[in-house]
Image (spheres, grey):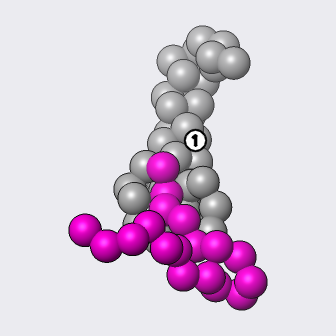
Amino acid sequence: MGSAVQPEREGRKLGVCSLCAKPSTSTICEQCEARIRGELLDEKQRVEKAGHTPRV
Protein backbone atom coordinates (compact mmCIF):
# COMPACT_ATOMS: atom_id res chain seq x y z
CA MET A 1 0.00 0.00 0.00
CA GLY A 2 1.02 3.63 -0.32
CA SER A 3 1.98 6.14 2.28
CA ALA A 4 -0.39 7.18 5.05
CA VAL A 5 -0.57 10.79 3.85
CA GLN A 6 -4.05 12.11 4.43
CA PRO A 7 -5.62 14.78 2.22
CA GLU A 8 -6.77 18.01 3.82
CA ARG A 9 -10.26 19.45 3.59
CA GLU A 10 -10.82 23.09 4.54
CA GLY A 11 -7.49 23.21 6.37
CA ARG A 12 -8.21 20.14 8.51
CA LYS A 13 -6.74 16.70 7.98
CA LEU A 14 -9.19 14.17 6.65
CA GLY A 15 -9.16 11.04 8.80
CA VAL A 16 -11.55 8.11 8.83
CA CYS A 17 -14.72 7.33 10.77
CA SER A 18 -14.10 4.94 13.67
CA LEU A 19 -17.21 2.94 12.77
CA CYS A 20 -17.41 2.71 8.97
CA ALA A 21 -13.84 3.75 7.98
CA LYS A 22 -15.10 6.27 5.41
CA PRO A 23 -13.19 9.56 5.09
CA SER A 24 -14.26 11.99 7.82
CA THR A 25 -12.95 15.12 9.53
CA SER A 26 -14.20 13.85 12.90
CA THR A 27 -13.94 10.61 14.85
CA ILE A 28 -17.44 9.51 13.79
CA CYS A 29 -18.91 10.63 10.44
CA GLU A 30 -22.27 12.38 10.22
CA GLN A 31 -24.04 9.31 8.80
CA CYS A 32 -22.87 7.03 11.61
CA GLU A 33 -23.69 9.68 14.22
CA ALA A 34 -27.23 10.00 12.83
CA ARG A 35 -27.65 6.20 12.81
CA ILE A 36 -26.48 5.93 16.44
CA ARG A 37 -28.80 8.76 17.53
CA GLY A 38 -31.71 7.02 15.80
CA GLU A 39 -30.91 3.68 17.45
CA LEU A 40 -30.71 5.32 20.88
CA LEU A 41 -34.01 7.11 20.32
CA ASP A 42 -35.68 3.83 19.29
CA GLU A 43 -34.30 2.11 22.40
CA LYS A 44 -35.51 4.95 24.63
CA GLN A 45 -38.99 4.79 23.13
CA ARG A 46 -39.17 0.98 23.55
CA VAL A 47 -38.08 1.22 27.18
CA GLU A 48 -40.50 4.03 27.98
CA LYS A 49 -43.36 2.22 26.24
CA ALA A 50 -42.65 -0.87 28.36
CA GLY A 51 -42.91 1.32 31.47
CA HIS A 52 -39.29 1.07 32.54
CA THR A 53 -36.77 3.76 33.32
CA PRO A 54 -34.24 4.13 30.46
CA ARG A 55 -30.64 3.05 31.00
CA VAL A 56 -28.29 5.91 31.77
What is the residue that sits farthest to the front in this orientation? 3
- Can residue 17 be seen by looking at this rendering? yes
Q: Residue at x 51, y 18 (%)?
A: 50
| Callout 1 crowding tier (Cα within 10 Å): few <14, some 14–19, many ≥20 | few
Q: Is residue 4 above or below residue 18?
A: below
Q: Residue at x 39, y 71 (%)?
A: 3
What x and y, as percent, mark residue 48? 60, 24
Foreground pick, 1 / 8:
1
Position of residue 25 in the picture relative to residue 18 (left or right) = right
Amino acid identity at mark 1:
Leu
Q: Is residue 21 above or below residue 6?
A: above
What x and y, as percent, mark residue 17? 49, 58
Quadrant (top left/top right/bottom left/bottom right) for the C terminus: top right
- Can residue 31 be seen by looking at this rendering? no
Q: Residue at x 71, y 87 (%)?
A: 10
What is the residue that sits farthest to the top in this orientation? 52
Q: Which region shows up in magenta?
A: 1-18
- Residue occupied by mark 1: 41
What x and y, as percent, mark residue 14? 58, 73
Disc count in the image?
A: 1
Confirm whether the magenta stretch covers residue 51. Answer: no
Confirm whether the magenta stretch covers residue 14. Answer: yes
What is the residue that sits farthest to the bottom in this orientation? 10
